[in-house]
Amino acid sequence: MAARDELMALMQQFTVETDRYVDVASERDSLYRTDLHALGIMMGAARAGLTVTPGLLREELNLSSPATTALVDRLDSAGHVTRRRSEVDRRQVHLEMTEKARITGAMLFAP
């Protein structure tokens, strides 16, 4: 039982420290917590060769449609994403990370 209690205490400490890190990184880069999570999702999607759409971000982040629009607008205004219409379905918008987003993401998630 002691090992379980120790593991729980370590998990709790990890969660607190992770939140602190995200707060400091958010402040440094003038991004909201959700913006950072969106960049992380986009980086993962890029590694997997997936196309990122506002709908994907909405689902992954559990956001409403208006909140997703505000998120994409913020990321676009900050220079982290560009919007591009799908060549297959012009109604669909694809989001692409910019070099600025890649640099910011590397700084956030690098050791």
Image: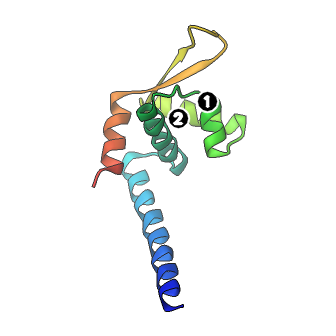
* Residue at image point 41% right, 34% down: 47
Disc 1 and disc 2: Cα gap in Å?
13 Å
Q: Judge by depth and name the residue closer to the eye, 20 or 15.
A: 15
Q: Dot 2, crowdedness within 10 Å: few (<14), some or many (≥20)?
A: some
Could one spot residue 69 in this view of the protein? Answer: no
**Image coordinates for residue 4, horizontal then vertical, percent:** 52, 84
Q: Quadrant of the N terminus?
A: bottom right
Image side of residue 65 versus residue 13, left or right: right
Image side of residue 62 versus residue 4, left or right: right
**Image coordinates for residue 14, horizontal then vertical, percent:** 44, 71
| Label disc, if present, on residue 74 of the rendered structure | 2
| Label disc, if present, on residue 37 of the rendered structure | none
* Residue at image point 49% right, 68% down: 15
Image side of residue 1 versus residue 55, left or right: left
Q: Quadrant of the C terminus?
A: bottom left
Q: Is residue 85 above or below residue 56?
A: above
Amino acid type, mark 2? Arg
The part of the image, by quadrant, that contains residue 23 is bottom left
* Residue at image point 44% right, 57% down: 22
Amino acid type, mark 1? Pro
Q: Which residue is mark 1?
A: 54
